[in-house]
Amino acid sequence: MKLVFERPKSLQETKTHYCPGCGHGVIHRLVAEVMDELNIREKTIGVAPVGCSVLAYNYFNCDMQQAAHGRAPAVATGIKRVLPENIVFAYQGDGDLAAIGTAEIIHAAARGENITVIFVNNAIYGMTGGQMAPTTLLGQKTETSPYGRNAQSAGYPIRVCEMLSTLDGASYLARAQVTDVKNILRAKSYIKKAFETQINKKGFSLVEILSPCPTNWGMSPSNAIFWVKNEMTKVFPPGIYKDWEEGR
Amino acid sequence: MEKILMKGNEALAEAAIRAGCQCFFGYPITPQSELPAYLAREMPKRGGVFLQAESEVAAINMVYGAAGAGARVMTSSSSPGISLKQEGISYLCGAELPCVIVNIMRGGPGLGDIQPAQSDYYQATRGGGHGDYRTIVLAPSSVQELVDLVYDAFDLADLYRNPVMILGDGILGQMMEPVVFKERPKRELPPKDWATTGMKNRKQNVINSLYLDPVKLEEHNWKLYRKYKEIEEKEVRYEMINCDDADYFVVAYGIAARIALSAIEMARERGIKVGLIRPITLWPYPAKAFEEVISRAKAFLTVELSLGQMVDDVKLSVNGRAPVYFYGRPGGMVFTAEEILKEIEKMRGWPDETGI
Ligand SMILES: Cc1ncc(C[n+]2csc(CCOP(=O)(O)OP(=O)(O)O)c2C)c(N)n1
Ligand code: SF4
């Protein structure tokens, strides 16, 4: 029999704790496939955030450190400075990266820290039960914006790729969505490029991935996909924001 | 061996490099600034990493990452900065990561001032961050001791997989004294086979402080507790000066102990038999030292540059068996030996009173 599909070596055999229709599982798989394809698993150290993906070390089959809320880029910096020849990636949600950890991500990028960040933007705090995130859309209802996010009292969503693209230290920045096969494959190609950026010692790379959270959005998995595609992409346009190879 | 005249902060930095410190992460704050400046100059030349972080919060988390990757790593700060590092210190203790944290204390609370103080004693010895944990706390009282304790700090950190704090005050950081960098025998230390260095040819290593299973969390905390007990048994350090014939005792650490010693000499000239108990480890606290003298002790006087923090540990050690008095100034201003002498004389005047 011909083997046509198997689990990437970089993923462990674990029962998922993610909700049905959650994007985290798909994104884990993409990162793992890229690690396999680049043959870097045995020299990679991942940093898990605080958030729904806090247990990332139970999924990725590589050395892992679990970081305090928002501090993954600092922890990754510490690792990378000690082990410059290894591959270091941080995996973060939007609450983690764009709220409590804003300083850490901006400065890791500004330093051109040679690490890769996988940034999962689901426009909400998943783990703590659906509170407003810095990436929550205007009008979006959450536990702490029950009447819809209002710019006057709660400010505006933060566009991370756009913001980081002003920093000279950032070498590769891209935003994708895990909504359909084409977009998932595109997300994977961005992730691969981000790791290649690090392998080539070109500095800081980050891939933002728009990802559904059906549970806290109060939607069916399929409606959540539509919402990413139709609503989130309006505020967070997918695409490549910075690429050292193309001089942008 | 060559004696060099050096400022405390710089001597500490040099000792750290000699003790094998591979990387330093910090954020500027007075009165410890000469330490990072020295390392910024020296580390790159001597194969180490120096990085000025964007904040104390980031610095301590860089320490976490580097320690987890198996390096000897240090950070330094002063009181308000140490407050910010508490989140990371709790995580370092939870994940059992070795590192050295220097606190050159200044006056607080809040922004306070940049003058010397010893008012971070509670924070240093009681944890400071969330959770049941302890950090080993070393309190030198001279520049030479500062240097010597740096080597010990790195070894103790690696031996117990635990953060070690060097607690000094502004004077110690700023004063210049002759120091000798002695060659030290290398201590046998456990291999860092738990470090995340890439999993080639072995199982996955995970650095973590999360235990979602309550049974596992409790087990982990009991394990930490047993480690702390072992440290309490094996690593207590203190110095006793003029104690052999004494019936009164001054208890002081760090710079306060230096000043107290002058006061004790003055008291002895006046015929008061007083000795000094100087804790070197503030955690584990040297309760032992008190046992040595308790049968003949008429009273104890705790002297601190705070409103009374270590005095709690003195009272716990004495446990009601003799009066315990306190004299302190809350930081910023430093007491003189004469002021302490007055307190010693008072103590002798009230031998039968119970302590404060
Ligand atoms: C210092 C600190 N503050 C708050 C929390 C609680 N907390 C846990 S997860 C989380 C939000 C995570 O949201 P996000 O990063 O968007 O990840 P998601 O769960 O959506 O994947 C918060 C606030 C914490 N663990 N630590
Ligand atoms: S709460 Fe949301 S982000 Fe968290 S696992 Fe469920 S769907 Fe995924």
Image (cartoon, coloured by chain):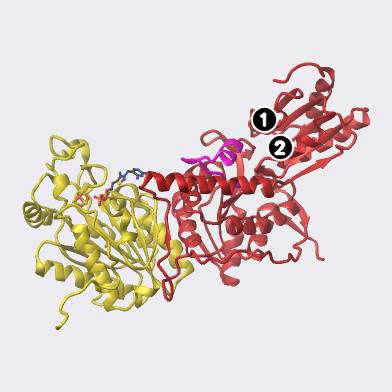
Per the image, label 2 sits on a secondary structure element best described as helix
Q: Chain of mark 1?
A: B
Q: CA distance from mark 2 to mark 1?
A: 8 Å
Percent across and percent down for residue B329 are 68, 29
Is residue B296 shown above or below A110? above
Would the CB of label 1 be found within 8 Å of ligand 1?
A: no
Label number found at residue B172: none
In the rendered structure, the answer to whether residue B15 lies left or right of residue A209 reads right
The residue tagged 1 is B316
Per the image, label 1 sits on a secondary structure element best described as helix
Q: Are marks 2 and 1 in contact (CB under 8 Å)?
A: yes
Position of the C terminus of chain A, as image quadrant, is: bottom left
Question: Is residue B30 at least partly visible in the picture?
Answer: no
Label number found at residue B287: 2
Amino acid under disc 2: Ala
Q: Chain of mark 2?
A: B
In front of the other: B129 or A107: B129
Question: Is residue B109 at least partly visible in the picture?
Answer: yes
Rendered shade, chain B = red
Is residue B196 shown above or below A123? below
What's the magenta region? B121-137
In front of the other: B338 or A94: A94
Rendered shade, chain A = yellow
Q: Is residue B122 magenta?
A: yes
Residue drawn at 88 percent across, 30 percent down = B267
Position of the N terminus of chain A, as image quadrant, is: bottom left
Q: Residue furthest bottom?
A: A1
Amino acid under disc 1: Leu
Percent across and percent down for residue B334 are 71, 34
Q: For label 1, count other residues whose C-alpha is less than 10 Å away and answer few (under 14), some (14-19) or many (20+).
A: few
